[in-house]
Amino acid sequence: MSSARITEQRNSGKRKRCCERCKEELELDEPYFLLGSASWHMRCFLCAQCMDPLVGTTYFQFEGRIYCEHDFNRLYAPVCAKCDKFVIGQVVHSSNYSFHLACFTCDECDIQLNSNGAYRYHGKILCFSCNQTMPKLKIYNCSKCRQRVEDEDLLMYQHEPYHAYHFKCTTCKKVLEADARTVKDELFCPRCFDFQCEVCFDCKKVIDPQIEQSLFSMNKHWHIHHFRCFTCARPFNGHEHYEKNGQAYCRDDFLELIGHHCFICDKNVTGAVIHLFGKAFCPSCYRCRGCDKILHYKDKVMELDMMPLCKKCIGNKTFQKSLKYKNQ
C-alpha cells in the first residue's frame, strides 16, 4: 500500500520512457509518475476497476494492476468476522473465517488467540480454557462428505446429519441452507415451502403445519389464536361459536346480535322471553304495574301505560280511586 503523489521528475529525453497503460512515449520535459520501474502519464494513472484518478490518493498494486482503496477492498480484501470491516495487512484465518489480528480474541475472556488455540462454540470463538467450561455439544459429521458439520450448516434429513449445501430445493433448485424444510422426504427452501402451506384468513400469513396449530372452519383456514369473535375479538380456543352473515361470534355476542332486550333491565334475554304490548320482558322483570308482583306469562293482565296490571289490582277499589285521582 502506497500514497501516489505527483513526482517532481520530468522526462529529460536521455532515456526512452513509455507509459505503462497507454504504451505511448513520454514527451520531452513532460511530468510523469514513476512506480517501481514503470512510468505513467499523470492522466493514465487510474484505478483499473472504476477508472478514477489515483494521483494524490491511496492505491494498491495487485497482480500488475493498480486499484483505489475502495475497489481493492471490495475485490480482494477479506472481511473480519468480528467487526465486519475489511482486513488490510495482516489477516488471521480460523475455521474458514478471517479476522484482524486485534479482533482475534476470545469472546468470553477477551484474551488474544492464535489460530491453533481457537475453538468455535455456538458461533463464538473461544480460548481453550473457556471452551472447557462450556456444556459439551453433540458433534455431527456429515453423512455425505464425512466432515464435521457446524451448527449454522447443519441439516437433519431422514434422521441423518448433513451439510445443508449438499442439497438443492426440489422446486427452485436453489442451494439449501440450514433453514431448509422437509415435506414427504422432499427438501424445500423456506420460500418454496411457504407456497405449499395454507394462509390464515385473519392475518394473511402462512400457517406452518409443522410448528403452528391451526383449524379449518367456515371454509377457511385459521391460526388457532386468530379464530375469534367478530365483536369482542376473544379467541374461541376450541369452544363453540355461532355464525351469522359470514362472521363468527361467541355465545354472548351472538345472543346480543339476534336476541331480545328486556324493556325493564335492558339486558339480553338468553332464556324464556315474554312479549306483551310490543315489548319484551325477562321473567324476573315481568311485574304488575300496580303491586310489583312477579307475574306468570299465563296470568290475565290489563294494560296500564303500556305496562301489565294484574287481575287483583284491577279489582282493587283503592287502586282504582288512586288511578282516577291521577288521571284528573
Image (tube, rainbow, N blue to C red):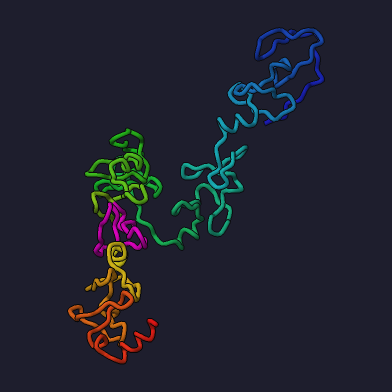
Q: Is residue 250 visible?
A: yes
Q: Main secondary structure of the magenta part?
A: loop
Percent coordinates x, y for residue 122 in the rendering: 44, 54
Q: Quadrant of residue 286?
A: bottom left
Residue 230 relative to residue 314: left or right: right
Look at the image and give the residue range highlighted in magenta.
222-249
Q: Eyeballing the image, is 258 above or below 115? A: below
- In front of the other: 123 or 198: 198
In this rendered view, identify the residue nearer to me: 321 or 231: 321
Rendering coords of residue 273 (x, y %): 24, 72
Magenta run includes residue 236:
yes
Quadrant location of the C terminus? bottom left
- Residue at coordinates 60% horizontally, 29% vertically from top-left? 71
Residue found farthest to the front: 328
Instruction: From this view, report whether residue 295 is shown above or below residue 176.
Output: below
Picture coordinates of residue 278 (x, y %)? 28, 68
Going 82% across and 10% down the picture, which residue do you hit?
Answer: 29
**Residue 37 percent across, percent down from the top left:** 70, 18
Work out whether 295 lies above or below 76: below
Q: Is residue 148 visible?
A: no
| Magenta span contains residue 230 | yes
| Residue sitting at x 65%, y 14% | 21
